[in-house]
Amino acid sequence: MAQTKIKDIRELTTEELTRSLRDLKQEALNLRLQQATGQLENTSRRRLVRRETARVQTVLTQRRLQG
């Protein structure tokens, strides 16, 4: 899965961003569990998920501070 551009993230509604953040955190948990049990094949996916989570949180914070 390719990373999402910040421009695309900013176009989403706050509700969609919140849902996306929840999904990303769940995926991060699953990836951590896979790594702990030795089942994780694509270790770079953890990094992508972590950065995507940061992008979504940044946009949510900016919106909260604006209004």
Image (spheres, helix red, strand yellow):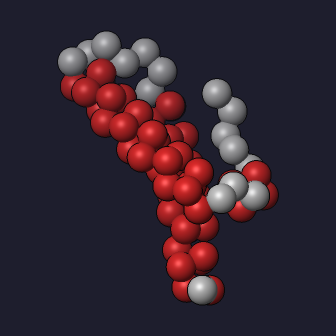
Single out the residue that lies furthest toward the left: 37
Residue in the foreground of this view, choosing between 53 and 39 = 53
Question: Would you place residue 56 above or below residue 24 in this image?
Answer: below
Question: Would you place residue 43 above or below residue 60 in this image?
Answer: above
Image-quadrant location for residue 66: bottom right
Q: Position of residue 62 (x, y in %)?
A: 59, 77
Question: Would you place residue 14 above or below residue 63 in this image?
Answer: above
The mark total stands at 0
Q: Residue at x 69, y 44 (%)?
A: 4
Q: Quadrant of the N terminus?
A: top right
* In-image side of 21 versus 25 (left or right): right
Q: Position of residue 2 (x, y in %)?
A: 69, 33
Residue in the foreground of this view, choosing between 21 and 4 = 21
Q: Position of residue 5 (x, y in %)?
A: 74, 50
Q: Quadrant of the C terminus?
A: bottom right
Is residue 14 visible to us here? Answer: yes
Question: Would you place residue 44 above or below residue 61 in this image?
Answer: above
Image-quadrant location for residue 27: top left
Residue in the foreground of this view, choosing between 34 and 16 = 16
Image-quadrant location for residue 13: bottom right
* In-image side of 61 versus 7 (left or right): left
Q: Residue at x 54, y 40 (%)?
A: 48
* In-image side of 9 versus 30 (left or right): right
Q: Position of residue 25 (x, y in %)?
A: 39, 44
Is residue 6 visible to us here? Answer: no
* In-image side of 35 versus 45 (left or right): left
Q: Residue at x 52, y 74 (%)?
A: 61
Q: Residue at x 51, y 63 (%)?
A: 57
